Amino acid sequence: MALWIYDGFDNYSSTHMDTQMAARGWSRSGLISPVVTDGRFGGSCLMGSTRLWTFSKAASGSGVMGVALGLGVVPRDQPYRLLEFRDGAAVQLGLALSTSHKLVVYRGTTATILATGPTTLTNNTWYYVEFKATIDLIDGHYEVRLDGAPEIPRSSSQNTRVTTNNSFDTIGLWGPTAPIKPDDFYALDTSGA
């Protein structure tokens, strides 16, 4: 497996975070700047960003992302997008926290739910979430792990794309308005896996 990016958000300052993250290859959509706050192991984590952070890479058909999520008191008013495999601006496959506080896999938008995990995530708790995907019209797959255990088992033969490409070239990390704090993010390909 080849690592595309790892970011623990520990070396950023709130006043220079945009330029520091851009230097690592991140791009941000939206106008609200993020801040850093206390992370899960005493370092820093991302918070206060209501926008999407993206990292572009060479097109690939399969990949895996992982992120620690610190949940504050999260409202149940809407699904909160967390991680996305994107083909340019189009979301091929994503992972969100549903209004019932369960992890859901979606294609395109959160209106097209492909699978829902059984665990209800509780407020004021840290979780580590891993999301693995293969983008394909006929033989696409996805799998979600929660704190190292299977949460959404590996799917078989699913349509996991919305564009004409069986690939993604951008990964997305959302910093939602709710008090969800991303920390210790990684993304890698699945070659050799």
Image: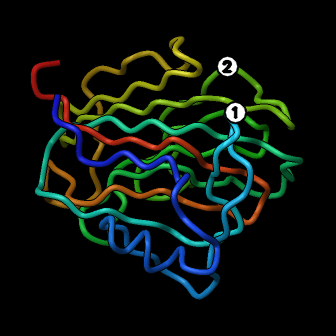
User: Which part of the image, by quadrant, shows the N terminus?
Assistant: top left
Residue furthest top in the image: 149
Pointer 1 and pointer 2: residues touching (CB < 8 Å)? Answer: yes
Rendering quarter of residue 111: bottom right
Describe the colour scheme in one phrase. Answer: rainbow
Is residue 72 depicted above or below 40 in this figure?
below
Q: CA distance from mark 1 to mark 2?
A: 7 Å
Neighbour class for label 2 at 10 Å: few (<14), some, many (≥20)? few
Residue drawn at 50 percent across, 21 percent down: 145
Image check: 28 left or right of 178?
Answer: left
Residue drawn at 64 percent across, 51 percent down: 44
Is residue 69 or residue 99 the one in the foreground? Answer: 69
Rendering quarter of residue 70: top right
Residue type, mark 1 in image: Lys
Residue drawn at 76 percent across, 37 percent down: 101
Rendering quarter of residue 36: bottom right
Q: Which mark is residue 102?
A: 1
**How far across and how far down the image is residue 149, in percent?**
54, 11
Pointer 2: what residue?
118
Residue drawn at 37 percent across, 45 percent down: 6
Is residue 68 depicted above or below 168 in this figure?
above
Q: Which mark is residue 143?
A: none
Is residue 96 or residue 182 the one in the foreground? Answer: 182
User: Which part of the image, by quadrant, shows the C terminus?
Assistant: top left
Determine the secondary structure under disc 2. Answer: loop
**How far across and how far down the image is residue 32, in percent?**
64, 83
Residue type, mark 2 in image: Pro
Is residue 15 or residue 61 the one in the foreground? Answer: 15
Determine the secondary structure under disc 1. Answer: loop
